[in-house]
Image (cartoon, rainbow, N blue to C red):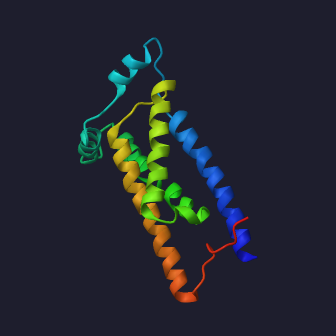
């Protein structure tokens, strides 16, 4: 009984997370640019050079009096934590996806869809650094789930994640 209640809580948390993810990636503090073709927009707005944005933001973080300090901090932090809940909730909700590659695969697929939709809707841009930070966060989220799951399993032999499929 306890595990069924927990599963319902996880489903609600997952739905809320998806809504927050959609808002954050498409509506929250986004610049919208119209008047360009999708191709022009993608070329102008994309960052395909790994660590370009990350290094720019980390340089801004060295000087707290920099006007862009808070922008850099928020951008790095949000991108780092954005996929932590997904990588935690995927294995918690879907027992068949309780391995690293399946969970990270779902995260990568979701992120590719989000990045492409940002370009097509012109509500953001494809940035390989966002992808890197999101995936680091996803790895942390999965590790948090693994640690919680196996430490509970070691103590009790069963966890609240061991609910019946319905």
Residue name at image x 49 percent, y 58 percent? 87
Residue name at image x 38 percent, y 40 percent? 71
Q: Quadrant of residue 54?
A: top left
Provide residue 45's location: percent of width, then percent of height.
36, 26
Is residue 160 found left or right of 137 in the rendered image?
right
Residue name at image x 43 percent, y 14 percent? 37
Query: Where 142 sits versus 33, above or below?
Result: below
Provide residue 66's location: percent of width, then percent of height.
29, 40
Quarter of the image where the C terminus is located: bottom right
Q: Is residue 150 visible?
A: yes
Query: Where 67 sits versus 145, above or below?
Result: above
Please identify the residue farthest to the top as the structure is shown.
35
Provide residue 20's location: percent of width, then percent of height.
58, 45
Depth check: 105 or 85 in front? 105
Residue name at image x 51 percent, y 66 percent? 98
Query: Where 117 sits versus 76, above or below?
Result: above
């Amino acid at each position: 009984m306890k595990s069924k209640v927990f599963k319902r809580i996880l489903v609600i948390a997952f739905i809320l997370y998806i809504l927050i993810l959609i808002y954050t990636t498409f509506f929250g503090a986004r610049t919208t640019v119209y008047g360009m073709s999708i191709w022009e927009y993608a070329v102008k707005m994309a960052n395909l050079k790994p660590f370009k944005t990350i290094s720019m933001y980390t340089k801004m973080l060295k000087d707290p009096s920099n006007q862009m300090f808070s922008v850099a901090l928020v951008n790095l932090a949000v991108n780092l934590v954005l996929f932590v809940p997904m990588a935690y909730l995927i294995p918690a909700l879907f027992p068949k996806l309780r391995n690293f590659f399946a969970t990270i695969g779902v995260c990568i697929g979701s992120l590719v869809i989000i990045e492409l939709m940002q370009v097509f809707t012109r509500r953001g841009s494809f940035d390989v650094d966002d992808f890197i930070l999101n995936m680091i966060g996803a790895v942390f989220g999965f590790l948090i789930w693994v640690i919680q799951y196996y430490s509970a399993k070691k103590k009790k032999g069963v966890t609240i994640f061991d609910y019946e499929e319905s």
